[in-house]
Amino acid sequence: MKLFISQLFFFFIILTTVESKAQSGELADRLYNAHETYKESTLTQRRFKQKDILPLIAKRQGNPLYIIEKAGDSFEGRPIQMITAGKGKKKVLLWTQMHGDEPTATMATFDILNFLEGKNDGFDDFRKELLEKTTLYFVPMLNPDGVERYQRRTVQGIDMNRDAAARQTPEAVILKGLVDQLKPDFGFNLHDQSPRYSAGRSPKAATISFLATSYDYELSINAVRERSMQLIVGMNKILQKYIPGQVARYSDDHEPRGFGDNVQKWGTTLVLIESGGYVGDPEKQYIRKLNFMAILSALDKIADNSLTKEKRDHYYDIPENGRWLYDLVVRNATVKQSGKSFTTDLGINRNEVNYANASKFFYYSKIEDFGDLHPQYGSQEIDATGLTVEKGKVYPTAYKNLGEISKLNAFNLLKEGYTYIRLAPDAGTRSLGLYFIASPLHVLRSGQATPAGTPGLGNTATFILKKGSKVKYAVVNGFVYDMENYAATKGQGIIE
C-alpha cells in the first residue's frame, strides 16, 4: 500500500508539472491572440512623446486598481511617473525608455495596463492571481527629455544606462531611489536594439534579445541571477513558437556602470529585454505584441513560482547577438572599372534621419561595405549574378521645385536608367539640408555632383543593375525597385 501511495504521489507530481507547462503555453497563446483587444489605440507609431502618454496616465487617476505618483522630474522638469498595481508580496519594478529612442516596451506597458483593467474575458483568474501575489511598479518613460528629441541619451548628453554608479543625471537618481525604496524582488529593464543584430551567426534578425546581467567581472551566478536566467529560459520557450530562431542574448560581460548589472548586484533579479528588428514591422507593432505576451507570461511565472522549474543552463543555449545583418545585400554584381571587370557584393544600411521635431523621420542609405560579404546577410537580398552595377544617369531637365518632380513618371525614368533629377538654381531647397522626397528618385540640388565612377564604399546607395542594356533593378537611396515587377506607389527618395 505504501508503495502504491508513493507511486500515486509521484504520478501526481509529474501530472502537475505537465499541466503547469501546458497552462503556461496555453496562457501565452491566449495572450498573443487577445492582444488586439488590449492594444492601446492612441499609440500606433513609435515616435510618440511624453505628451501622448500623460493623458493615458491621467485617465487612470482615481481608478482603485492603481496608485499613481510622481517619482521625480527629468533634467528639463518633465514629470516621471510611476503606476502601481497589485498588493502581493512579490515586488516587480518595470521601467521603459531610459533611452529616449527605445519605445517598444512603453507601448506594450499601456497594453498591459489595459489588460489589467479587463474582466469577463477568460483571464479573470490569471489577473486575480497576478494582482494578489505581486505588486507591479511601472515607470513607463524614464527619459522623457530624450524621448522629446528621439535620442538615446538624456538632454545632458549622458547615457543613463551607464550612470548607475556616478548618478550625474536626475533620471538615474530617481531609478536608484526607487530600487532603494521599493526593494523589488524582480526588475525588468526594457530596451530596443538595432534591427541589424542577428540571432547568432544567422540570417535571422534578433527580434527579441535577453540578458541576465552579471554583477561582477567573474560572471558569478548566485540565486538572484539564477532566477534571471530561469525567467529568460521560460520566455524564450514561449517566443520560439512565434519567432523561431529569432531570439538572442547579449554577452554577459560585466558593465560596472550599467543599471542592469548594479540592480542585480543590489539584490533584485533583473531581466533585460531588447526589442530588435522584424522584417515588415518598422513601427514595431508586432514586436510590441511579443513584449505584451512575453512580459505577462513572465509575470505569471513569478506569481506562481513556476520559473524555478526552468533549467538555468538552457540560458546558454540561446545564441548570442551577432553583427551579421545589413538592411540590403546585393550579391555577385559585376563592376566594370578601368577596362576590367570583377564581381563584388554591396552591403547597404538605411539610417533614420529625424525631422519635424523628431516626431518623424526619413531614410538616408549608404553603401557600408563593398567586396566579399559571404559571411554576412541582408534582411533583403538581390542576387545580381549576371548583372552590372552602374551609376544612374542624370535627367537633362532641371526642375524649379519638388512639386514638379513629384509629378514625373518615376517608373519610366528608372526604366531608362535615370535615377538622378536636378533642381534649378532658384529652387529654394538649400535651407532644408539633407531631406527626402516621396518619389523613388534621387534629387540633386544645383551644383551637386553625382559620385565619380561606380557607386562604392561610403556613397549614397543609388545605382542601377543592368543586364546588357536593360535595367533590371534600380536602387534609389537604398530601396529596390524591380523593373519587371514595379509596384511603387510611394518611394523613399532623397534630396542631397
Image (spheres, rainbow, N blue to C red):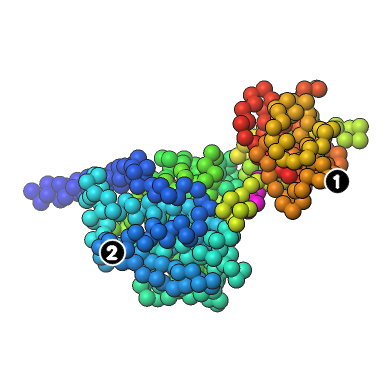
Residue drawn at x 34%, y 55% is 113
Q: Which residues are magenta?
A: 347-354
Q: Which residue is mark 1?
A: 447
Residue drawn at x 37%, y 42% is 36
- Give the residue furthest to the right: 339
Secondary structure, magenta segment, majority class: strand
**Is residue 4 covered in magenta?**
no
- Say left or right for 487 vs 213: right
The mark nearer the N terminus, 2 or 1, is: 2
Q: Is residue 311 above or below residue 159?
A: above
How far apart marks 2 and 1 lie (CA) works out to: 62 Å
Q: Nearer the viewer, residue 336 or 253?
A: 336
Amino acid type of the residue that numbered disc 2 sits on in the rendered structure: Gly
Residue 273: % across, % down: 47, 56
Q: Quadrant of residue 159?
A: bottom right
- Say left or right for 62 vs 74: left
Residue drawn at x 73%, y 36% is 404
Q: Is residue 404 above or below residue 85?
A: above
Q: Nearer the viewer, residue 63 or 130?
A: 63
Q: Which residue is mark 2?
A: 62
Question: Does residue 315 appear in the picture of this structure?
Answer: no
Question: Does residue 80 appear in the picture of this structure?
Answer: yes
Residue 95: % across, % down: 43, 63
Q: Residues within 10 Å of mark 2 (few under 14, many from 20)?
A: few
Amino acid type of the residue that numbered disc 1 sits on in the rendered structure: Gly
Secondary structure state at the residue bearing disc 2: loop
Q: Is residue 167 above or below residue 255?
A: below
- Say left or right for 111 vs 206: left
Q: Nearer the viewer, residue 30 or 334?
A: 30
